[in-house]
Amino acid sequence: MSDKLKKFIADNEADFDQLPKAGHFDRFKQKQTQLSHTQNSNKNSIQILYKIAAVFVLVVGIGWLFFNLGKMQGSQEFASSQNTINTNSTNELAEAEYFFNQQVDVKKKEVMLFASNNNEATSQIMKELERLELQYIDLKEELAINGDNEQIINAMIENYRMRLSVLEKLLEKLKKSNITKQKHHENIQA
């Protein structure tokens, strides 16, 4: 033992031999109970935080998984379309242009049927389509300059896909909006 500890014990030896004051044990038990309640509530709080963190990690993990699976599926479809175009690119590009042009025209007609009330969102999306069409014209000019460049051909096909995707999303929104308006109109008439 250190000298300071020995000296303290020797100086206060009489205090060590005394019994505690009345109610000491009761106060001690009360403080002990309060401490255990505080620790239990802290444990519960920590357990809740762990549960929340686990749910968050699970949701993020599932989202990441679906995102990457969709990405891989899209890239596989894109890769398969690349292989078909590369074999006889000029004829197949013409066929692809014909097919995609038909698809885009059909979707545009459907959009125009549902877009009787031209709202701002529809007009913005149509401007985006125009931008994509101008981008496609630039790609076509670039293809004429560079010959059968696979990257340009792939970019052209991706441009068509983007246009179709934008039109499909717009069409879904317009259909939902139309259904909601019909239900509202039916409720008013009833």
Image (cartoon, rainbow, N blue to C red):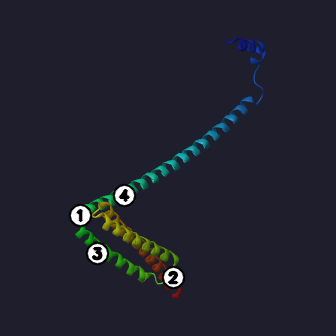
Q: Residues within 10 Å of mark 4 (few under 14, many from 20)?
A: few
Label 2 is placed on what type of residue? Answer: His
Q: Secondary structure at mark 4?
A: helix
The residue that mark 3 highlights is 98
**Mark toward the start of the polypeptide (3 vs 4):** 4
**Point 52% across, 50% down: residue:** 52
Q: How far apart are labels 1 and 2 at the CA level?
A: 48 Å
The residue that mark 1 highlights is 84
Label 3 is placed on what type of residue? Answer: Tyr
Which residue sits furthest left? Answer: 87
The residue that mark 4 highlights is 71
Residue 141: percent from left, percent from top: 35, 69
Label 4 is placed on what type of residue? Answer: Lys
Please tell me in which quadrant of the rendered image residue 111 appears. Answer: bottom left
Q: Residues within 10 Å of mark 2 (few under 14, many from 20)?
A: few
The residue that mark 2 highlights is 184
Q: How far apart are labels 3 and 4 at the CA level?
A: 26 Å
**Mark toward the start of the polypeptide (1 vs 2):** 1
